[in-house]
Amino acid sequence: MRITRWRLSHPRVLRAAAFVWPQAHLLSMMKVRDAMTPDPATCQPTTALRLVATLMLDHDCAAVPIVSGEEVVGIVTDRDIACRAVARGWNAAELPASAVMTSPLVAINPDETFDDAIQVMSENHVHHLPVIDDDGRLVGIVAQSDLGRRLTNRELGLLARETSIRRKGRGPAKLVRSDA
């Protein structure tokens, strides 16, 4: 907000300064661990998509991280199932998760800020970020809706637009991890 366009004594400016700025300031300090869903439902690359969809239904989620041993190797979203399997006429009941999962993975560290999560989501056009600790273990997942509960309507709208619009020249997703 640009206060220079208003008189400082104007009541709307004082209200905006009292409520908008502190929220933005708090978001830059809040950590991903404060909004993430801990211990999300997971499955293996060989799990049938029908079972992945059942997990989504049972856990009321739209994304399931795919793990092999202790390592997160990808993620399957409801959109992956619809667009990469069902729309192509593939038998989703028998198809393994590895056939439609998004890999390599775009992820974030639990100690990164909300601003970092928003930037990673926007740059990679994703709605779900697996949260991986410094040891490479999955500790949670953060969705755009988790962040949206703490954003203003305008900020959420901008985030939704940034993560939904596919731009020309978009390359493959990249692994994003904090080494700090």
Image (cartoon, helix red, strand yellow):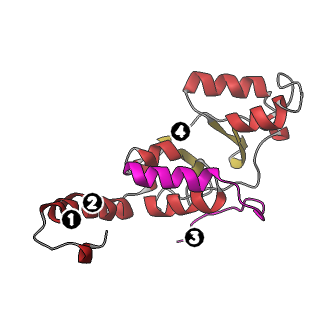
Of the two numbered discs 1 and 3 on the same chain, state the one appearing first in sequence. Answer: 1
| Residue for badge 1 | 17
Give the numbered dot on residue 39: 4
Q: Secondary structure at mark 4?
A: loop
Residue type of the residue flagged with mark 2: Val
Quadrant of the drawing holding the N terminus:
bottom left
| Residue for badge 3 | 179
The magenta stretch is: 152-180
| Residue at 62% across, 56% down | 107
**Relative side of 84 to 1, left or right:** right
- Rounded to the nearest angstrom, the CA distance separating label 4 from label 1 is 38 Å
Please state which of the two labelled residues, at mark 2 or mark 4, is closer to the viewer: 2
Of the two numbered discs 2 and 4 on the same chain, state the one appearing first in sequence. Answer: 2
Q: Of residues 126 and 40, which is closer to you in this image?
A: 126
Q: Is residue 179 above or below residue 141?
A: below
Please state which of the two labelled residues, at mark 2 or mark 3, is closer to the viewer: 2
Mark 1 neighbour density, 10 Å: few (under 14) some (14–19) many (20 or more): some
Q: Secondary structure at mark 1?
A: helix
Mark 4 neighbour density, 10 Å: few (under 14) some (14–19) many (20 or more): few
